[in-house]
Structures are given as structure tokens and as C-alpha cells.
Image (cartoon, helix red, strand yellow):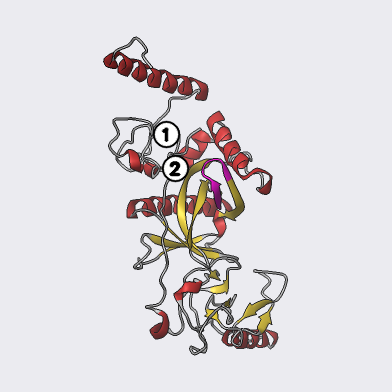
Amino acid sequence: MRTGFDRPSLKILRSWGVLLLEFRGAVQDGIKREWSEPFGTGTVQKPSGSREDPRRDRRDWEIRLGQRPDRSQGGDLIKMVDYLANTEINSQRIATVENCFGTSGQPLAMPGRVLLGEGILTKECRKKAKPRIFFLFNDILVYGTIVINKRKYTSQHIIPLDEVTLETLPDTLQMKNRWMIKTAKKSFVVSAASQTERKEWISHLEECIRYLLSKTGQQPPTEHAAPWIPDKATDICMRCTHTKFSTLTRRHHCRKCGFVVCGDCSRQRFLMPRLSPKPLRVCNLCYKQLMAEKKEKEDGSKPIHSPLVGYEPSSGDDSDRSDEEKLEHWSANAEFYMTDVAWPSLRS
């Protein structure tokens, strides 16, 4: 369709249109927009719609921290939280997240809570690695299942940051830039698209955790749930080492150690109140250990140390990598399958 304008004129009009839209957005926010780098690295990113941006395909790998104070000096987190806590843009962003989860999610807005960033990470689940949306607040970490990105999420999980411990993990053949998020009730492995993104995620998570612990005077948690080893990591039982899994022979997970075991090696149940009010499936080896610990406690003696140093009860619905008692059998079999990872911009 002919418009009466030549191509140079149309280009100028489009440029003015983009500028007017950006100006209107800045006025509505009541604050000048800052197009920032992922969690504050040195490179300034252009707006995601910029035609001149040669890295346009990577724009969704950016985390926008919003209008924030100068990060060149110390106390970045405190300054950022104080700066954004009572702003309209922060309220709008939190409301947007709540709307995406809908009635299936819990309310997230509360006085003093600030949404610091968001992104899509690959979470290593029981069956396979899956993309999950993560939202970093100054006091909690929220994640969920993506139905329509930036529109609809389900299966909301809320983790208080003062209960979290982080552990950087080595790369595998299929998954890179991995780390573990550990709590007493659940532990799981996630991965980022690059080392820089993993570094920024861990840096900001640790900063939030330190800030919360310093406010409450608490000590970092020392007991963590064991992550579940993914089903595809092994074709045989990791306890008896001779039962082969098939359509008829199901895989099970020990809630204590996270190993993939057969039915004969996991017939016992044990009550672990931190994980569930009901007795949970455990492998025979862990059952013997738990019973021995229970007897020692009843006799007033010291509990027996766990054979899996650093991991306690297993997480209920995550399938993750744990320390293996029989390292010679399982070190080469713990393979995970990575999906695409994106870091969507945090924008109103």
C-alpha cells in the first residue's frame, strides 16, 4: 500500500515513533528508564526492540534490574532495595508476576519486598531437564512452570532465601554452568546459558542470603535435602546393581539419599518430619542407617554420621544429582539433558 512517503521519510517517522513510545513509558513510570546489563556487568544493552542491535537474538538473555542506584560502591543490595521498595514500578512488576501465576499462586506483594530480577533457568528434574521461570526477590526465590512465557505460569514454588545454601557444580557433557540450590526440604540443580549468567545469579543470591542472615542473626543452614538423581542417569538399580529397569520394572527414588533404586531395594518407609508428615520410601541401606540413628538417639548417644556427607533427607519432587556412595559405578553415568535457556528482560 502506498503511503505518499518515500523510504527515508518512513525511516525517520519510525524512529520518532520509537522515541515517543520510550518517552511515554518513562513518564508513566515516573522515573527514567535504564537499559541495564545482566545483573550489572560492564556492557550496556540496547532496548530489546532496537533494530541496530546486532545481538538482538540474545536480548532475552538479559536480566533487567530496573531503575537502580550507582552500583560502583558497597552495599549494592541495601541501596537497591531501599531505592525500589516503595516505587510504583516495583509494585507493578510484582503484580505482573502474581497475575501470571493467577489463582494457582500465592500473593507475593508485601511491605519491603522488592523484585530484583527474573530469568529462565534449566532445572534438572526427575525425568529430564526442563526450563523453569525464576524470580529473585530480596527475601525469597520463586519459580514455576512456563505455560506461556510472560503470560501464564503454574506450579508456583516459594523458597525463603535465609534457608538456602548454594553449591557450584562441575559441567557435564550435556549440561553446563550448573549449581545446586539446597534447603532442608528440597535440593535441586539448575543451569544457566553462560558462565557469566551463573556468576551473576549466584552473586546476587548470596548477597541476598548474607543480608537476611545478618538481619536475623541466624547461622547458615547445615542440613540439606539430597537431590534426586534423574531417572535416565542409570539403567540399573544403584543399590543392588543387578536389577535392570524396564517398562515392568519401575524406578523409585530413596527420599534419604536420592538414589534410583528398584522396588526390592526400597520396600521400607521411614518418617522424616522435615519432608513429610507421612513415612516416605527409603532404600534398605538408608533404612538401616536411620533405624540405627533412631536407636542411638533413644539411648542418648550421638547419632551416626550419614554416609553421604553434606546431604541429608532427599527432596520430594526434584530429580537431581547427589553424592554417590559407589562412585566407581555411577560417576560416568550421571548425565543430564539440557534445554535452551533464556533470560527475559524484567520490564513493565
x and y percentages locating residue 247 in the rendered image: 56, 78
What residue type is disc 1 on? Pro
Locate residue 294: give its quadrant: bottom right
- Main SS, magenta region, reads strand
Q: Can residue 148 be found in the magenta stretch?
A: yes
**What residue lies at 39% left-to-right and 42% top-to-bottom?**
62
x and y percentages locating residue 212 in the rendered image: 54, 51
| Residue placed under numbered mark 1 in the picture | 69
Relative side of 24 to 74, left or right: right
Relative side of 142 to 323, left or right: right
Is residue 50 shown above or below 123?
A: above
The residue stretch that appears in magenta: 143-152
**Foreground: 103 or 137?**
103
**What residue lies at 47% left-to-right and 24% top-to-bottom?**
31
The label shown at residue 344 is 2
What residue type is disc 2 on? Pro
Please, what secondary structure does the residue beneath circle 2 have? loop
Q: Can residue 330 be found in the magenta stretch?
A: no
